Amino acid sequence: MNRIAAQGAGQIIGLIDGRQVVGLDIAKGVFQLHTVDMSTGEIVNMQLKRAKVLEHFANRAPSLIGIEACGGAHHWARELAAQGHSVRLIHAKAVRPFVAGNKTDATDARAIWLAVQQPGTKFVGMKTLAQQATLVLHRQRDLLMRMKIMQTNALRGLLYEFGATFARGKNALFSEIDATLESLAGDIPQYVADSLREQVQRIKNLAADIKAIEVRLVAVLRGDGDMKRVAAIPGVGLLTATAAIATMGDATAFKSAREFCAWLGLVPKQRGTGGKVQLLGISKRGDTYLRTLLIHGARSVLTHTKEPGPWLEQLKARRPANVVVVAQAAKMARTIWAVTARQQDYQRGCRNTQAANGLSW
């Protein structure tokens, strides 16, 4: 329950659930704090060095602290929550309308303080240490994959300049690369051939690093019940299962499966006026990486499934292929939320029913 009181020169002072509200703008070295002293009505706007932040809040009564969801926000949310404070992570889009005047640390902290008190504000779920650790593996793998692809494409382009061509696919490239370099020994200097061989070795090292990360992700999946339940869904593999649970955070923070689907950007954008609403393409909001994995998984289902089911067959008969892929990805996302929020194993053909705890698809 929110209770808002006015005091001073039109300044809004907030209490949420009996706790004083604090807006905290985090940074690398200097943090900015904005609040109002409830006993005197004084506006408190102060800077805190990074090393003094936890010490400052350790000496305060339990408060509600608003933080913009940015780099390092989940770490500070966990640290402050451990001290007994309630922490709300706010998306930057929800904070931006309250930034008045020049953008400074002080105005940002005040904007966070105002945004956290607005009714209907949706907050970002705080990730656990294990979830963030899993996402670190995904970010590292994604970076290594990009580097590997760039190095491979560059190698093909460099050899093409000397008349060497390869069939599509990495297997064709690496099965023929040694013979190709040998055949070009009389046409290119030795130092160029040595440099190209070093590039081939770099690509192989990147592939080995990617494989090592995937082995670690397998160990993470085996030790997490939610991930194992999600991995049983058709089209959901190792990467999608681990990324979905780590990105989702607390599944019950979403009211329904559709809300989780909208959070991932897999629902249509809407444009309306005069009572008429036009549905457009998907919104593409939310986490691009997880949405991409779901799309690839959905495409795999459409390509390889032996029993697509009546829903998928009817959809394929009346809609374009890409629309069907996105619809399947959205269905997978809803299923991921359902089995996680309800803590139930995946059951093929399970009907959409209301659960006893009130959770709905």
Image: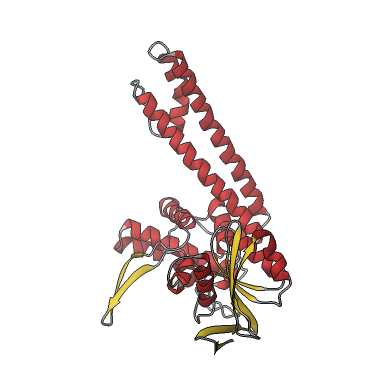
- Residue located at (38% from left, 26% from top): 158
Side of 347 relative to 56 (left or right):
left
Q: Tell me where residue 288 sits by quadrant.
A: bottom left
- Residue located at (46% from left, 18% from top): 193
Residue 172 locus on image (x, y percent): 43, 29
Residue 133 locus on image (x, y percent): 63, 54
Residue 87 visible to the viewer: yes
Question: Foreground residue, 163 or 346?
Answer: 163
Q: Tell me where residue 331 sits by quadrant.
A: bottom left
Which residue is the extreme one toward the top? 186
Say which quadrant the N terminus sits in.
Answer: bottom right
Using the image, determine if residue 333 lies above or below residue 351.
above
Side of 250 relative to 182 (left or right):
right
Residue 231 locus on image (x, y percent): 57, 56
Question: Foreground residue, 173 or 103?
Answer: 103
- Residue located at (48% from left, 62% from top): 332
Using the image, determine if residue 49 lies above or below residue 17.
above
Residue 252 locus on image (x, y percent): 58, 72
Residue 166 visible to the viewer: no
Q: Tell me where residue 103 sits by quadrant.
A: bottom left
- Residue located at (49% from left, 63% from top): 333
Colouring: secondary structure
